[in-house]
Image (cartoon, grey):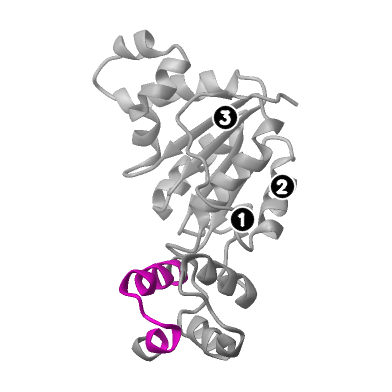
Amino acid sequence: MPANPIHLTNISRPTDKVIGRDAQLKQIRKRLAEDNSVVLVNGLGGIGKTTVALEFIHRYGGDYRHLAWIEVTDSITAAFVANRTLIDNLYLSAVLENLPKEDYEVLALERIINRLSNLDNCLLVIDNANNHDDLLACGHMLRTLRATTLLTSRAHPEDWNTVPIDELEPKDAAALFQRHFLAGVQPEQMDTLWELLRCLDHHTLLVELTAKAATKARLPLTALYDKV
């Protein structure tokens, strides 16, 4: 188990300790331990999928020899082909420059996937692969790729190996709120806090943004609850 895996791309570090996702992280690790495993982390926007993926690398990246992070903004294929850091670290720059312009993306992706497949013990994370049809189109390629692959997505294709990321447990939502609500919550205000969090559906991003906005506006908890 390498102590210092090789980063094939730039990979951010979690800014804060992740709250309330230990069970999902352990489940992801267990499933990824299967041979040629592809695991899809699924959930609503803002629920914390990217945070979970980053935390997975932070906790368990030492299980792997190579790490790569692909951020999808258009299609999965385009994300691979546009990642110059990955291409450079795979020593593919010259190879891709000589490819014909016709079908360039398809041919370039084939070279990248082939090179990744030949690496020993590689973890590939594909973040924000939210297009359902794009996932299905790339499904065969991902399953035949000889690299452990973790994806995050709002889409939920049938028959994929999926770990859902749901809303936070109330106690975890409270801990997240209190991390960012600098005015503090007094013991006698806990009922108000529970009700506020219920109104926010214990949604990770909503809880965090609400706490930060209240802190910036210097709103006490009761005034915040009335506004929500």
Q: Earlier in the sequence, mark 3 or mark 2?
A: 2
- Compared to residue 73, the image places residue 94 above or below, namely above
Label 2, on which residue? Answer: 31
From the viewer's perspective, is 100 left or right of 127?
Answer: left
The image position of residue 85, as x and y in percent, is 40, 23
Residue 162, numbered circle: 1
- Compared to residue 170, the image places residue 68 above or below, namely above
Label 3, on which residue? Answer: 67
Residue range corresponding to the magenta coloring:
207-225
From the viewer's perspective, is 212 left or right of 196?
Answer: left
Neighbour tally class for label 3: few under 14, some 14-19, many 20 plus, Cα within 10 Å: many
From the viewer's perspective, is 184 left or right of 102?
Answer: right
Q: What is the magenta segment's predominant secondary structure?
A: helix
73 and 209: which is toward the camera? 209
Comparing labels 3 and 1, the label whose residue is closer to the camera: 3
Comparing labels 3 and 2, the label whose residue is closer to the camera: 3
Distance in Å between CA atoms under marks 3 and 2: 17 Å
For residue 187, which quarter of the picture? bottom right
Question: Is residue 211 within the magenta segment?
Answer: yes
Q: Earlier in the sequence, mark 1 or mark 2?
A: 2
143 and 200: which is toward the camera? 200
Tell me which amino acid carries mark 2. Arg
Question: Is residue 76 within the magenta segment?
Answer: no
Disc 3 is placed on an element classified as strand
- For the N terminus, the quadrant is top right
The image position of residue 168, as x and y in percent, is 58, 70
The image position of residue 72, as x and y in percent, is 38, 42
From the viewer's perspective, is 169 left or right of 78?
Answer: right
The image position of residue 216, as x and y in percent, is 33, 69
